[in-house]
Image (tube, rainbow, N blue to C red):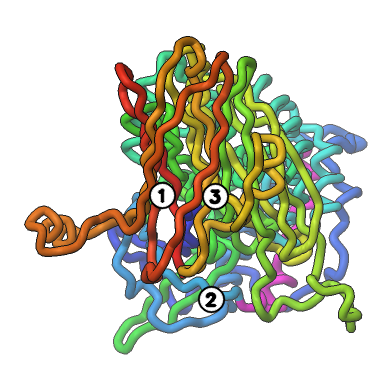
Amino acid sequence: MSIPIPLTAALLACCGLVAATPAQASDPGAGGIADRARVDFAASAATTAPLQAPGAADSADAHSRARSLQTRFERRRVRDLPRTLGGGSHPCDAIIGRLCIWDDGNEDWEPREEPESIRDWRLELLTELASLARAAPGDHWIFGQRIRYSVEAGLLAEAEALARGCGLPVRWRCDAFLGYVQHHQEDFVGAESAFARALSAMPADTAGSWADPHPLLDGELRDWLEAQPDSAAAARRLWTLADPLYLADGNERWSAHLSRRVYAMSSDGAMSPHQLRWGKDMTEAVVRYGWPIAWERSWPRAGQSTIQVTGRDPPASARTLPPRDVLDGGPDSMDAVVWEVPDGHAQSVYLPTYVDTIGSLDGQTGRFWRRDGVILIGVATLPDPPAGIPHPEPNPPPAALPLAPVEAGLFVETEGVARTLGRAVAETGDVVRLSGMAPLADRGVVSLEAWAPGHRRAHRIRLGIGLRRLPPDLLAISDLVLLEPGAEPADLEPMLDVVRASTHVAADEDLTVAFEVYGLGFRAEGIGFSAWVERRNEGALSRFGRWLRVRGPREEVSIRWEESGPERPQPLFRTLRLGLPGLDPGEYQVVLEVSVAGRAPLVGRRAFTVW
């Protein structure tokens, strides 16, 4: 099972395909750096009324000066950026206007420390902008630069104070800037609240553009969205599912999207580190991929007088929107479809700031129908931290290992609402067993998650699932669930305590499987069961060889039996055991077929790995 594959997206400014920045760019006013150890934010908050209202000429002069200073800073930045070889040598995975975007696949890349000179110049810019804000207190562009560069400098408390004291005449901009700051403070609930106020107050066409997920969608998801009878409800569902971790409060993917919109708004007409004026292409790139966390400047090649500037995203940024088949289901919309990420360049990516990676969680989920809902279970072993991650406390005693607490949760999304079914706190290596009742719905998504904040690591399993009500006499089957060796629970309740916490099985183990059958007990009828193990993802040559009967049967091991149905309507709980003698390591699945005379046979499957 896999979830977002780590991606690295880089931006290369281009003019046509490649943009050239003069290696010796002019630097107006690049003289000595003034003493600027502290930026005076309070003295020029936009709400502070000057003794005499500034005239239009003063405001215009301040605005013009602010633009010149912002341009000067970005030219200075480029001059001292860390150098790298081979900038611009990559083929473009996507071209957006003047920008070339590629995935370099380097998961080990780490940003180099920003030069002190750039940090000093940024503080100097902030000081000068604060002074200019007194002459133009209602200038949203100057205000936006102050917010944007304060956040870039890590001055989040100062940026929050500035945003809360915002006195811009267009109030929704104040809420938008506050949401931007709160998102970077990882107060995602507060950010959502601020953005909700901004969206409700801004012009309808602006709100519609900001909330529109279309720029983030590949062709299949666009087709899905446009085919929905209620596009607004469908868009809300996409945003709910894009939330990378329900364990974290708030929907950080939604607030990140709106933060990207605020970043683009504040950058309108500004000079970028690419030495290009902000335009629609940069807005699209920021909305899809975010703004880079680090910048690099390539050395000019022999005979060239130009440089190229590359911006880098977090290496593990990944797709967060669901594949279409998770939304639609398989040929039978009741099927469970694992949320997997296709290979290739992503239309959009994101990584929460509170984790370095989100990996795949090895565990099991299962559905068991009841009259008023569907019982969902989730069982997994909490992953150990990667080698090399230090303990959060110096010189921890041996009893302190495993390293840190891990939060776990089982969630279900239906109709755009994510519900918590169970939560737990444990340690790495522990087994968590969670369950809860999900509401009936056509389709939903179940998410089993683990998050170790101290290790900055998270893992999850997500599946698209059918949750429709079953007619009482409809022959149906639950998910198959793998149990611990030798387990023989009598019914569903004790089964949860013996569900296997991993889908990895040793070659010499017995495979124990539990399931329920529904729609029985309304009449006397016999039931036939057939179960077998087969390889998954068998190649075309192997299938052709079996068809010619020059290779062995696909079934590795099998079992069959018959019995009478229950005397009254009720779920029929059963377990079966299959030996796995001599199976080679690889990917397999156990298949169960249930047959009743006069009814279409049922087939259930559960994948597992032999190691």
Side (left or right) of 110 relative to 106: right
Q: Are marks 1 and 3 in contact (CB under 8 Å)?
A: yes
Distance in Å between CA atoms under marks 3 and 2: 36 Å
Q: CA distance from mark 1 to mark 2?
A: 38 Å
Report the residue at 33% width, 54% height from top: 534
Q: Quadrant of residue 141?
A: top right
Residue under the point 52% across and 24% down: 467
- Tell me the mark number nearer the camera, choosing from 1 and 2: 1
What is the secondary structure assignment of the residue under circle 1?
Answer: strand
Main secondary structure type of the part rendered in magenta: helix
Tag 1: amino acid: Val
Observer-nearest of 64 and 590: 590
Instruction: Using the image, determine if residue 72 lies above or below residue 351.
Output: below
Packing grade of label 2 (10 A; few <14, some 14-19, many >=20) is few
**Disc marking residue 482:** 3
Q: Earlier in the sequence, mark 1 or mark 2?
A: 2
Residue type at mark 3: give it. Answer: Leu
Tell me, for residue 108, which label it has, or none.
Answer: 2
268 on left or right of 408: left
27 relative to 323, above or below: below
Q: Amino acid at mark 2?
A: Asp
Residue 61 can be seen in this image: no
Circles 3 and 2: CB atoms closer than 8 Å: no
Q: Determine contact: label 1, label 2, CB under 8 Å.
A: no
Across and down, in percent, residue 404 comes to 81, 65
The outermost residue toward the bottom is 302
Instruction: Provide residue 59's location: percent of width, then percent of height.
Output: 71, 39
Tag 2 or tag 3, which sits nearer the N-term?
2
Secondary element under disc 3, as helix, strand or loop, is strand
Q: Which residue is mark 1?
A: 590
Start and end of the magenta stretch? 112-137
Q: CA distance from mark 1 to mark 3?
A: 10 Å
